[in-house]
């Protein structure tokens, strides 16, 4: 397994501002991902964070809105840009330690509220 | 068509009973299947994984997979109030993507 730390754990933000969420994993992992979980809903994959290159975004998510960095194997950031109330959600960092079996481990999440 | 479907519940069972959670998936080529437990306000926690047809038991939990029917289930024996949570079914489809169902909310009544 992997221990995944995220910060901030929660924040209240003003409309139009941007916030960067940091994710640190305690061991080297093969893949890192960012998910969003809106109130009462399941998890939606935003993007795969690729080490040293541009992230791979899922349909409906774009780099300008959700820029992602992954400078090394154990650290990634997600920025939520130009926030609106619709961005109020829990953002979850996750990591996979074994590409063959596919288990994902999650950080504690960052709960963002946009006013 | 959704990739992974679950009955959203809520499912209520008395303490000590067996809770049965079900999940169907659409991609017949899926190879890896997972059950996560999510307590309110917390992140998902992996509790079971299953890769081949049949049953896999771990303590009070049993995962069942039937690839022909594209069906995976989770049984919780001797349910405890601490099992009350939302259970998410997840299916690995393709190289990287893990699709999650909407979750089934389970309440175990003391």
Image (cartoon, grey):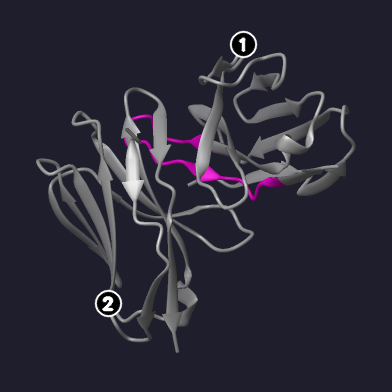
Judge left or right: residue B20 versus residue A35.
left
Q: In this view, does A3 lie above or below A20?
A: below
Residue at (48%, 27%) from the top-left corner?
Answer: A30
- Location of the C terminus of chain A (image quadrant): top right
Judge left or right: residue A35 versus residue B80.
right
**Residue that protrudes farthest toward the left in the picture:** B68
Other residues around mark 1 within 10 Å, as few (<14) / some (14–19) / many (≥20): some
Q: In this view, does B1 lie above or below A66?
A: below
Output the chain of dot 1. A
Judge left or right: residue B77 versus residue B42.
left
> Over which residues does the magenta segment extend?
A95-110
Q: Position of residue A59 (x, y in %)?
A: 51, 19
Residue at (41%, 81%) from the top-left corner?
Answer: B80
**Residue under label 1:** A54
Other residues around mark 2 within 10 Å, as few (<14) / some (14–19) / many (≥20): some
The disc placed on residue B18 is 2
A93 or B20: nearer the viewer: B20
Question: Residue B93, located in which quarter of the rendered image?
Answer: top left
Q: In this view, does A83 lie above or below B81?
A: above
Q: Where is residue A102 in the image (x, y as percent from the top left)?
A: 37, 36
Judge left or right: residue A80 versus residue B90.
right
SS for callout 2: loop
Q: Is residue A69 above or below residue B101?
A: above
Q: Position of residue A113 (x, y in %)?
A: 79, 45
């Amino acid at each position: 397994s992997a221990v995944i730390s995220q910060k901030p754990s929660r924040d209240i933000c003003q409309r139009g501002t941007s916030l960067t969420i940091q994710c640190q994993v305690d061991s080297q992992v093969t893949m890192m991902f960012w998910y969003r979980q809106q109130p009462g809903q399941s998890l939606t994959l935003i993007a795969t964070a690729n080490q040293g290159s541009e992230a791979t975004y899922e349909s409906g998510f774009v780099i300008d809105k959700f820029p992602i960095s992954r400078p090394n194997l154990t650290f990634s950031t997600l920025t939520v840009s130009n926030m609106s109330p619709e961005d109020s959600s829990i953002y979850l960092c996750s990591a996979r330690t074994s590409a063959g079996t596919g288990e994902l481990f999650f950080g504690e999440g960052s709960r963002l509220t946009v006013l | 068509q959704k990739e992974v479907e679950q009955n959203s519940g809520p499912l209520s069972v008395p303490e000590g009973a067996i809770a049965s959670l079900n999940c169907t998936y659409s991609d017949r080529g899926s190879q890896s299947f997972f059950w996560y437990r999510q307590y309110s306000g917390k992140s998902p926690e992996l509790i079971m994984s299953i890769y081949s047809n049949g049953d896999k038991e771990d303590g009070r939990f049993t995962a069942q997979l039937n690839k022909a029917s594209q069906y995976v289930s989770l049984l919780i024996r001797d349910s405890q109030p601490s099992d009350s949570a939302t259970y998410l079914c997840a299916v690995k489809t393709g190289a990287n993507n893990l699709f999650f169902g909407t979750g089934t909310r389970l309440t175990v009544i003391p």
